Image (cartoon, coloured by chain):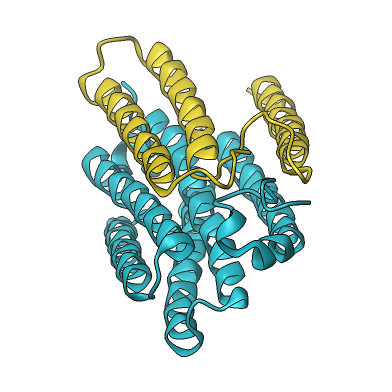
Chain colours: A yellow, B cyan
């Protein structure tokens, strides 16, 4: 997490950078779908990648989570939750889409 | 722990209020655990949506019911509200009076309500076109996911109203500050969930 005693201007700048980056990533993702310069499957992959980047940006700039050692285990909790989510979501999708495929 | 260490996610009070800063760690870590379990809940609704995506049962599919423009406007409104809440947090930390805090919170509340109104309008249009939750597995999972997020935003809006009352009654009291830090985590978290929603649901459904 970032140093809690930076000046007010530096804190406003962090939120401003986060807002600008998130807006740019959002506009890019919607633009790709709107103008469709790539095939649909490529567009979906890029959009999901941009979404992941934007989530990291928001964690960094709005929730002030960094890779620095912090007083509490917030980052470990996020990573653990991400692991659980990854296991449960990918497990669900693999098992049920495979079943769907076999039932066809 | 000194006031130089970050104690919790979100904006830390630090030396501006070292006593509350030391107390905030415990309270906010507990709330952070709740948010992460809420994230697991949302993730499983996403998984359900992914599984149900092809289960349209002959009814309307994603490309028939989603609208790119309203999804984009809703996204920008919610993202802006996340930024204005950040400004409210900074005012809470640095400003002397409560006027700038209540002003930024008021803007955030207005944006949150605008988001809810647009989302309600979208869902009402869908229901009017026959895309009701009972129509197909795809629509059930879509409505469950979107409505749960909408209910969270509604709860956040009510919480902002409570926060405004607390600010007016108690001023910049230590407990009010901790409440406001909690609300900040909640509000930013909702925008992060929305990023996943517009990427996975709307943009994936509309990609040609």
**In percent of the image, x 59 and y 64: which residue is there?**
B17
Frontmost residue, B112 versus B84: B84
Q: In this view, does B12 lie to the left or right of B66?
A: right
Locate the N terminus of chain A by quadrant.
Answer: top right
Frontmost residue, B15 versus A25: B15
In the rendered image, residue A70, in percent from the top left (x then y), is placed at 73, 39
Residue B47 in sight from this viewpoint: yes
In the rendered image, residue B73, in percent from the top left (x then y), is placed at 24, 46
In the rendered image, residue B46, in percent from the top left (x then y), is placed at 58, 41
**In percent of the image, x 27 and y 30: which residue is there?**
A27
Q: Is residue B148 left or right of residue A27?
A: right
In the rendered image, residue B198, in percent from the top left (x then y), is placed at 41, 39
Residue B62, quarter of picture: top left
Q: Is residue B115 above or below residue B105?
A: above
Frontmost residue, B147 versus B99: B99
Locate the C terminus of chain A by quadrant.
Answer: top right
């Amino acid at each position: 997490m970032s140093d809690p005693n930076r000046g007010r201007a530096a804190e406003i700048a962090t939120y401003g950078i986060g807002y600008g980056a998130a807006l740019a990533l959002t506009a890019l993702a919607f633009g790709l779908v709107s103008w469709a310069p790539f095939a649909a499957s490529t567009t979906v992959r890029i959009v999901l990648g941009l979404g992941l980047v934007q989530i990291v940006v928001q964690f960094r700039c709005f929730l002030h989570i960094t890779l620095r050692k912090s007083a509490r285990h917030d980052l470990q909790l996020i990573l653990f939750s991400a692991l659980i989510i990854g296991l449960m979501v990918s497990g669900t999708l693999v098992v049920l889409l495979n079943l769907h495929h076999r039932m066809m | 722990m000194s006031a130089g260490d970050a104690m919790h996610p979100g904006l830390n009070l630090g030396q501006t209020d070292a006593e509350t800063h030391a107390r905030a760690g415990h309270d906010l870590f507990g709330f952070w655990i709740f948010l992460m379990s809420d994230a697991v809940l949302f993730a499983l609704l996403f998984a359900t949506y992914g599984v149900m995506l092809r289960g349209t049962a002959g009814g309307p599919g994603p490309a028939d019911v989603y609208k790119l423009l309203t999804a984009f406007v809703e996204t920008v409104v919610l993202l802006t509200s996340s930024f204005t809440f950040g400004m409210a947090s900074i005012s809470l930390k640095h400003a002397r009076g409560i006027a700038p805090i209540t002003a930024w919170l008021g803007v955030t509340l207005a944006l949150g309500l605008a988001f809810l109104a647009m989302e309600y309008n979208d869902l009402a249009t869908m229901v009017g076109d026959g895309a009701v939750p009972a129509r197909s597995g795809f629509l059930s999972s879509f409505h469950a996911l979107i409505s749960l997020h909408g209910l969270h935003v509604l709860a956040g809006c009510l919480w902002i109203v409570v926060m405004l009352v607390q600010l007016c009654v108690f001023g910049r009291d230590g407990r009010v500050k901790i409440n406001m830090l909690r609300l900040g985590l909640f509000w930013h978290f909702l925008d992060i969930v929305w990023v996943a929603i517009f990427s996975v649901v709307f943009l994936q459904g509309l990609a040609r």
